[in-house]
């Protein structure tokens, strides 16, 4: 049974950091990043090692901004798009923090926020406890694994999205901070009936719709109760499809989703200046946009109440080659402003 969990005092964002590559720095939220590497290499010799560096740098920056050291973190949840999540493992092993390696594809951010929030709440809500969540992706590493290496010069279809070279780290602390997680809900796996690996937005949209509708049904709330309903990386195709699904579900009844919905994949890049086709994607997409744009807005009180649903396309190179349908998932967290 799908279940919402509530944290009355909230699990707060103690600090956070966003790291990105060249294209991410050129985008609309580029100024909000803590570190940009115009080479996309981050001082590493391979794309895969570069992604590990994104993890390491993100967490180091969040620790520095939060003025704490790694030894104060009681649990670290992390994940990425590389096979067996090795980018996170290699990048974060030196911190020597109790570790949960997660794979929810591009939904890994909210999966991690749920896991760490529950851990901190189960520990009694001790304000002295800290948890951390790190997610990352690298465009060149993802293309080599899931599609074709960049040097092949393969053409992308209009529905294809651009995997972000980016990452984010978030330090959580019970009952602390102006931006707090006050409710969470795991998503349910949904079959988007899409087999095209270049159309992940369409594959993930049904899962996002399912989570949104389930959440409002269980809470007795409506989209009008929120300033923002933020999905992870549906991009143009998936965002349009999400609106169509929900409009049909509401059957003409007034609802404010279209006015309140936004998508991280639509925020990361400038569609007029950057050739990203349907928008951004990747584990680092929602993490970087949340840290660079939306959490600061919550802390300023500009956003008082929001839902975040990082959306994941649960697939592998083998599943795509075998033409299996792409499964979607959309775990959900509620973030609120607390003065």
Image (tube, grey):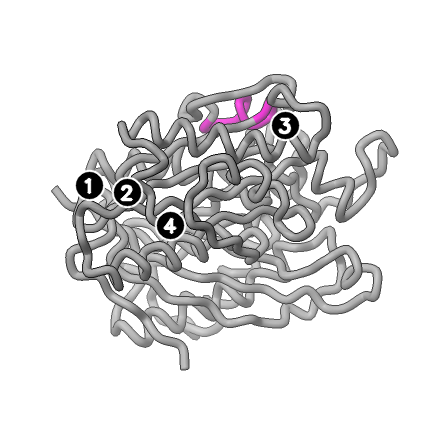
Determine if residue 227 is in view. yes
Q: Which residues are magenta?
A: 21-29
In this rendering, the answer to whether 186 lies above or below 29 is: below
Q: Which residue is mark 3?
A: 274
Q: CA distance from mark 2 to mark 3?
A: 31 Å
Check disc 2 and report the residue beneath it.
Answer: 13
* Mark 1 vs 4, N-terminal side: 4
Which residue is at the front of the view, 187 or 260? 187
Residue at image mark 1: 177
Q: Residues within 10 Å of mark 4 (few under 14, many from 20)?
A: some
- Of circles 1 and 4, the one toward us is 4
Mark positioned earlier in the residue sequence (4 or 2): 2
How far is disc 1 from disc 4 in space, using C-alphas? Answer: 19 Å
Residue 102 disc label: none
Q: Quadrant of residue 318?
A: bottom right
Q: Residue at x 33, y 43 (%)?
A: 73
The disc label shown at residue 75, or none = 4
Q: Are marks 2 and 3 in contact (CB under 8 Å)?
A: no
């Amino acid at each position: 049974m799908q279940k919402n969990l509530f944290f009355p005092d909230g699990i707060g964002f103690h600090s956070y950091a966003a790291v990105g590559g060249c294209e991410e720095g050129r985008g609309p939220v580029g100024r909000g990043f803590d570190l940009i590497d115009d080479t996309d290499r981050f001082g590493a010799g391979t794309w895969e090692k570069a992604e590990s560096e994104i993890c390491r740098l993100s967490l180091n920056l969040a620790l520095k901004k939060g003025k704490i050291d790694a030894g104060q973190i009681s649990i670290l949840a992390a994940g990425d798009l590389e096979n067996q999540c090795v980018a996170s493992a290699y990048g974060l092993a030196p911190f020597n923090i109790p570790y949960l390696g997660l794979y929810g594809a591009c939904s890994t951010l909210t999966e991690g926020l749920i896991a760490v929030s529950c851990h901190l709440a189960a520990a009694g809500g001790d304000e002295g406890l800290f948890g951390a969540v790190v997610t990352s992706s690298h465009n060149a590493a993802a293309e080599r694994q899931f599609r074709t290496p960049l040097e092949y010069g393969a053409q992308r279809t209009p529905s294809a999205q651009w995997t972000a070279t980016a990452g984010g780290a978030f330090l959580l602390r019970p009952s602390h901070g102006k931006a707090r997680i006050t409710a969470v809900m795991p998503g349910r796996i949904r079959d988007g009936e899409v087999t095209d690996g270049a159309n992940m937005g369409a594959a993930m949209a049904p899962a996002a719709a399912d989570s949104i509708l389930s959440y409002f049904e269980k809470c007795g709330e409506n989209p009008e109760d929120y300033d923002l309903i933020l999905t992870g990386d549906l991009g143009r195709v998936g965002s349009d499809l999400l609106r169509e699904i929900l409009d049909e579900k509401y059957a003409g009844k007034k609802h404010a989703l279209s006015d309140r919905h936004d998508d991280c994949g639509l925020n990361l890049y400038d569609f007029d200046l950057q050739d990203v086709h349907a928008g951004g994607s990747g584990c680092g997409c929602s993490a970087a946009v949340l840290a660079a744009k939306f959490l600061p807005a919550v802390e300023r009180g500009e956003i008082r109440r929001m839902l975040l649903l990082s959306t994941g396309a649960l697939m592998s190179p083998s599943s795509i080659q075998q033409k299996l349908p792409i499964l979607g998932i959309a775990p959900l967290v509620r973030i609120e402003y607390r003065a």
